Amino acid sequence: MTILSYILQHTNLPEKGVTNTLKLLQEDCTIPFISRYRKEMTGNLDEVQIGDIAKYKAAFEEVQKRKETILKAIHEQDALTPELKQRIEAASTLVQLEDLYLPYKKQRTTRAAIAKKKGLEPLAKVIFNQREENVDFVAQKYLNGEVASIEDALQGARDIIAEWVNENEFVRKKIRSLYSRRATVMAKVVKSKKDDEDAQKYQQYFDWNEPLNKAPSHRLLAMLRAVNEGYVKLKVDVEKDDALDLIDDVIIRTEVESSTNQVFMAIEDAYKRLLQPAISNEALKEAKERADEAAIKVFSSNLRQLLLAAPLGEKRILALDPGYKSGCKVVCLDENGDLKHNENIYPHPPQRETAMAIKKIRSLVNAYDIETIAIGNGTASRETEAFIKRIAFDRDLQVFIVNESGASVYSASKIARAEFPTYDVTVRGAVSIGRRLSDPLAELVKIDPKSIGVGQYQHDVDQSKLKSELDTVVMSCVNTVGVNVNTASAPLLSYVSGIGTSLAENIVKYRTEHNGIKSRKELLKVPRLGAKAFEQSAAFLRIALPEHPLDNSAVHPERYKLVEKMAKDKKVSVTELVGNKELIKSLNLKQYCTDEVGMLTLEDIASELEKPGLDPRKKAKVFEFDKNIKTINDVRAGMKVPGIVNNITNFGCFVDIGIKESGLVHISKLANEFISDVNSVVQLHQHVMVTVTEVDISRKRIQLSMID
């Protein structure tokens, strides 16, 4: 099997597109670069399709690497026959490979190995042949100092046969299929932990069972978390008789009672002692992998929406990190997000220095020409919002409530310490709140995505797969938007196609030393930024007020000459062509088609010329919560209240209604019709109206509905 046939087997993608994408990946091209600037080669494959090719490429390479290890191991045992070698080379999955390798795997001392040492393998072969009518008579021949009785001999023979049954590729395949179709997952409470207070959140699983293939991702992960915390025991099983019948169909070949009775006993032992535990664990592992995949998909979708949330843009912002006893930390940021001032105010109890706080805020707004106010949505957020809105300013100021999840993680991070070495965590946290309003993407890339507060069971899924997927999402978002090379932080630059951490730091150092980067061409002067990195990154890096008008667009430098020809044909300069919609629409793009540049690329260029460097994100909008709701005690069933979707899961979405506790809109309460995908109805940060259906103050839970 070749890598091409392997990928085509797992996808419905065109062969030419897959072949060319593999070539580009082999040349160290990134997914954003390939999808945007190599459309003719791929046949216009999008990032998801190219990502799938990359994923299956890695999976194929893992299988090939395992094949080499297995072939070498069996060869060293002088057991590699031409037929076995052919079967191993033809295997397309790790499961198939491990089944073929199982009889040759070096294991700890087993019951079968002990029986073989006692010389009982020939007896096992006679019995397994299922033609001997008097196995007791044959067994007598194997009595010796280590085998005291006929039953000892037969038991040893059965141990060997049980191992053969367990290692039978076709038996394992049938049992594996049975588990995939009919396995049940059963949860039982650990009796000694039944009354523990922390165990009550898993009460649903104290006595639970359902088909394993029907268990939704969030429920299986919840059960596994309960297992890991010691409150529940989990078992995956099928009907024993169904399994034994399948094994009998493969193994039993005759009706010679004396032999087959022994084989039947060996089969039952093989299933109970060897097959059932192994295949059960394998089935649970595969179900966990599917649950992980579903949870990671939800997390990725949420993260993408969060990173591409509407930015306010370059505004002078006064940001507040609210609090009671310790006061509210106030920072003033200029339009570039640079910190200009910080101090504390105490508008709330116990100090309640309201008049002084009002005076300070007014003074700061005037002194730093503030255009917008951002308030974190943590403790005392609503009270701080009410306090700010009571102040009579001499200008119109929009007030935004900003989700501050992860701000404390950022404020204590190495990145924050490097940015603000002389300020404490409270200042850094407030700065993060203000910058999030200005540009969520630029600020959130500094935080571990798991700390941002979206998704479900992110700490329970495969962490390496989660990190890989989330890194891919962040890279996709950063390159979709584009980055100002002269203002972007090193963490943001590191996600640009072809850059990475080391080059990002070199770019920041170079622009500092040279008072900024004036053109894309100048990027080649950055230490260690060579031709390949330039090819992959240049079009995603923008130069504000550039020397060359295309340096602030998504047009790749390799196509500048083409655009210059277009401008020349229209008898204008490139500067005059950019943004001139009528002139651009009058271009006959077909006349610029070549073997290398097709209509797909030309249409992208024309679109970019019309609106160069256009930010694909929407603009931030002010939102107001219900002023009468300050705590969960103010919430009543039947209320209709405004809210913001702040998390999406497979079973519904959570809505921030302006208090500490978010309410849940179950998937069944999203619309009047059946919904299979929550994202088809709501998006992260969407402004919604919800009806309160239930309030459980003791458990701090609020149930909501979006059904009109």
Image (tube, rainbow, N blue to C red):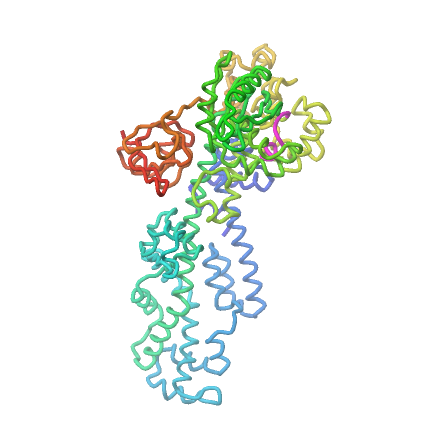
The residue depicted at 39 percent of the width and 50 percent of the height is 222
Q: Position of residue 52 (x, y in %)?
A: 48, 42
State the image quarter where residue 74 is shown: bottom right
The residue depicted at 38 percent of the width and 25 percent of the height is 627
Circle count: 0
Question: Quick one: quadrant of the C terminus?
Answer: top left
Observer able to see residue 666: yes
Magenta-span inclusion, residue 487:
yes
Q: Position of residue 320 (x, y in %)?
A: 53, 27
Residue 686 in the image: above or below residue 471: above
Q: Is residue 538 left or right of residue 290?
A: right
State the image quarter where residue 228 is shown: bottom left
Q: Position of residue 542 (x, y in %)?
A: 60, 24
Residue 372 in the image: above or below residue 254: above
Q: Is residue 521 left or right of residue 609?
A: right
Magenta-span inclusion, residue 226:
no
Q: Is residue 37 left or right of residue 224?
A: right
Observer able to see residue 597: no
Magenta range: 486-495
Q: Position of residue 329 (x, y in %)?
A: 55, 28
Residue 591 in the image: above or below residue 297: above
Residue placed furthest toward the top: 571
The residue depicted at 69 percent of the width and 25 percent of the height is 522
Q: Is residue 276 left or right of residue 104?
A: left
Q: Nearer the viewer, residue 196 or 643?
A: 196
Residue placed furthest toward the right: 513
Q: Nearer the viewer, residue 682 or 87?
A: 682
Residue 617 in the image: above or below residue 494: above
